[in-house]
Image (cartoon, rainbow, N blue to C red):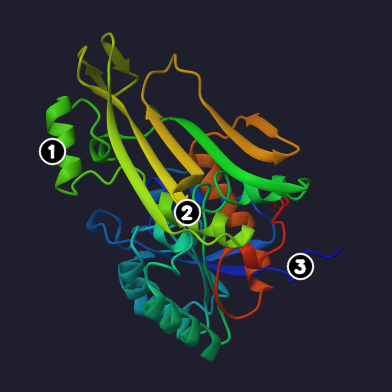
Amino acid sequence: MVLYKKMGKIRVIQFGLGAMGSMMAKIMLEKKDLQIVGAIDRKPENQGKDLGVVLGLKRNVGVKVSDNADEVFRTSKADIMLHAAVSYVPKVWEQIQGAVKQGISVITIAEEMGYPFPKYPALCNEIDATAKKYDVSVLGSGINPGFAMDLMPLFLTGICQNVKEIKVTRVIDFSPFGPAIQKNIGIGMDVSEFKQGVKEGKLPLHIGLPESLSMLAHGLHWDIDKIIETRDPVAAKKPITVPGYMKIKKGNVAGFDHRCFGMKNGKKVITLEELGRVDPKEEYYNRIIIEGIPRLVETINVPPGNITTTSHAVNLIPVVLNAKPGLLSMLNLPVAPALSQ
């Protein structure tokens, strides 16, 4: 089976050069079939600099970083763009539609774009229609949503006679991430401050759990009556030193439990648990439990998104370029294996 046609050198724009976007760019520079032809970033200190300099490499790569997205879209003659800048669908569309209208396909790691159809039906119709008009594909995917808590469980159900319930627990090490992300998940806060932040919507924690749940339910043809989310702080039982960042006092927030439940006829049929921690001594894993015939319990190591999401997005490039036009999800695509160096 041919997963995608060999296409020769693929011309790529990198939109966003934060931690994730920079990692994507570095990975692409190692791939023989990919050529970065444009780099977009809003930070003033990066403007006009060679991408290699911005990435901290010891060489120039011949691509200047620009904050003029429309100019890059118009002049780069790119085939596809990797987007790593925002999390929410309306803002994503604001940033990528110029590329789409220049005939450039897009892969974004924006969490809500992993499966945006239930939450944004009208906007999804607009994105889909525009992509089809300009004969390009738009996909949102990462490690989660897009793989660990939705696609992998669906693959496993393929060896089941029937499935009654699914539970996925992902315990993630947030200690490698920088201060900005740790601040967004409340690390170091007083527990009461954390709870107030959740109540006011200032601490969304993991964005994308409802999207993963909706993709999983759609793949199984399950009609979910209601989705319930809970967000709880995890207090440090002892002082914790986060390597290279901060010290957390005993009793302050050292992680979170974010859960999402898919309800059908008053019963939980899908449970997704994202349990974030910053204790380097914690055990981190991804566990999938499928209640059915047969009962499956699979526990695997899925590292944090700084390497997995970025690699996944890069590996998807030729698959998306060979896909049908429109707004897609991972349910529309074949397997995307690792690209050759």
Relative placement, left or right, of 161 versus 37 is right
Relative placement, left or right, of 327 versus 227 is right
- Looking at the rendered structure, the secondary structure element under dot 2 is loop
Relative placement, left or right, of 4 versus 319 is right
Q: Residue 242: where, in percent of width, then height?
A: 32, 20
Determine which residue is flagged by label 2: 265
- Looking at the rendered structure, the secondary structure element under dot 3 is loop
Q: Could you give the CA–CA distance between mark 3 and mark 2, rounded to whole angstroms?
A: 41 Å
* Residue 11 in the image: above or below residue 334: below
Mark 1 and mark 3 lie on one chain; the one further toward the N terminus is 3
Mark 3 and mark 2 lie on one chain; the one further toward the N terminus is 3
The answer to which of 34 and 229 lies nearer the viewer is: 229
Q: Comparing marks 3 and 2, which lies closer to the viewer?
A: 2
Q: Comparing marks 1 and 2, which lies closer to the viewer?
A: 2
Q: Could you give the CA–CA distance between mark 1 and mark 3, rounded to whole angstroms?
A: 49 Å
* Residue 298 in the image: above or below residue 210: above
Determine which residue is flagged by label 1: 196
Look at label 1 and name its amino acid: Gln
The answer to which of 71 and 289 lies nearer the viewer is: 289
- Looking at the rendered structure, the secondary structure element under dot 1 is helix
The answer to which of 110 and 192 lies nearer the viewer is: 192
Q: Are marks 1 and 3 in contact (CB under 8 Å)?
A: no
As drawn, the residue found furthest toward the right would be 1
Determine which residue is flagged by label 3: 4
